[in-house]
Amino acid sequence: MSQAFYSHARLYDLMFPGGGPAVDFYRAGANRQGGRVLELGCGTGQKLIPIASDGHPCVGLDFSSAMLAEAQRKADERGVVVEWVQGDMRAFDLGRTFDFVFITANSLLHLQEAEDLVSCFRSVRRHLAPGARFVFDVFNPSVRLLAEADGVRRTRESLSFLDPDRGSVSVDVAETYDAPAQVTRGTWYLSTNSEPDFVVAPLEIRSIFPQELPLLVSLGGLRLVERLGDWSGRPFAVDAALQLCVCESA
Ligand SMILES: C[S@@+](CC[C@H](N)C(=O)[O-])C[C@H]1O[C@@H](n2cnc3c(N)ncnc32)[C@H](O)[C@@H]1O
């Protein structure tokens, strides 16, 4: 239910310009680990292109041909080589192993069913070289914030951006929380003064609660080695923004 959202790859990069501590974190992880790198749900390559520019052989897998086309364009522009693969992280077979595999920016949370998460983890495990690390980040669900999703359309001032083609773009979001499914179902509206709602796209994102996370990981044949709470490496705690998980083959 989120494909339409990711068909606007150029707008995605304008709305979420990337950079910052997440790039530094994954770049440092890949450098520490060395060897071959795989990102699942790589999008436009915001993390993978800098990692490839450090000299690592990199593969980026994503569902969206639009996101991959933009990733390829950006990599070419920077003179960086990455192998971009269209595929589904729920089940994939690249026929080789990697030393560092990661999934970032809540991409994993597009998998809504527990079976899909476990199937993804099993696919990851099959792609881990001996001693490899698998790292992913998902948000730490706040019951208070989830309960605030009341279906009302509101402007997200912090996401407004300047599109060189269209001018100033505002972003509105209306969200409801489907508690039994643990899924926040949103509709995103992008508008300019002259073109209201030129994009209207659904975006759905699951919550993985802290107690279920290690169980899903272990059902996928992996072991949660460490869970951090932020990009600076603070241990995970109840009020942490993130669940930043470091895993290895069980
Ligand atoms: C929030 S974006 C993150 C992109 C990138 N990792 C980043 O940090 O900018 C989520 C990405 O996951 C991809 N995605 C969603 N479901 C997927 C699936 N089942 N298999 C592969 N990619 C998927 C989307 O197409 C999108 O590019």
Image (cartoon, helix red, strand yellow):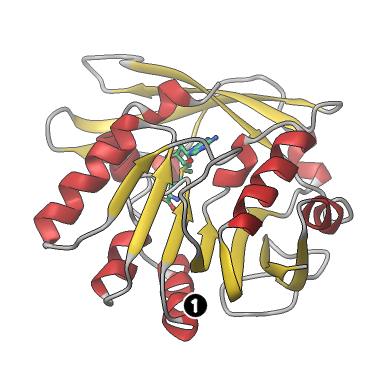
Location of residue 113 (image quadrant): top right
Residue 232 shown left or right of residue 49 in the figure: right
Q: Residue at x 24, y 71 (%)?
A: 53
Dot 1: what SS? helix
Q: How many labels does the image show?
A: 1
* Residue for point 40% across, 30% down: 6
Amino acid type for the residue under numbered disc 1? Gly
Q: Give the residue number, with chain letter if any, for mark 1.
A: 29
Relative horizontal placement of residue 33, taking residue 219 as reference (left or right): left
Q: Position of residue 229 (x, y in %)?
A: 69, 69
Counting from the top left corner in percent of width and height, residue 132 is at 58, 73
Name the residue located 10 percent from the left edge and 55 percent from the top edge: 77
Q: In the picture, residue 125 is in which quadrant?
A: bottom right
Q: Determine the residue positioned at 42% across, 46% down.
A: 61
Residue 65's spot in the image, x, y percent? 32, 31
Asked whether 239 or 203 is in front, the reply is 203
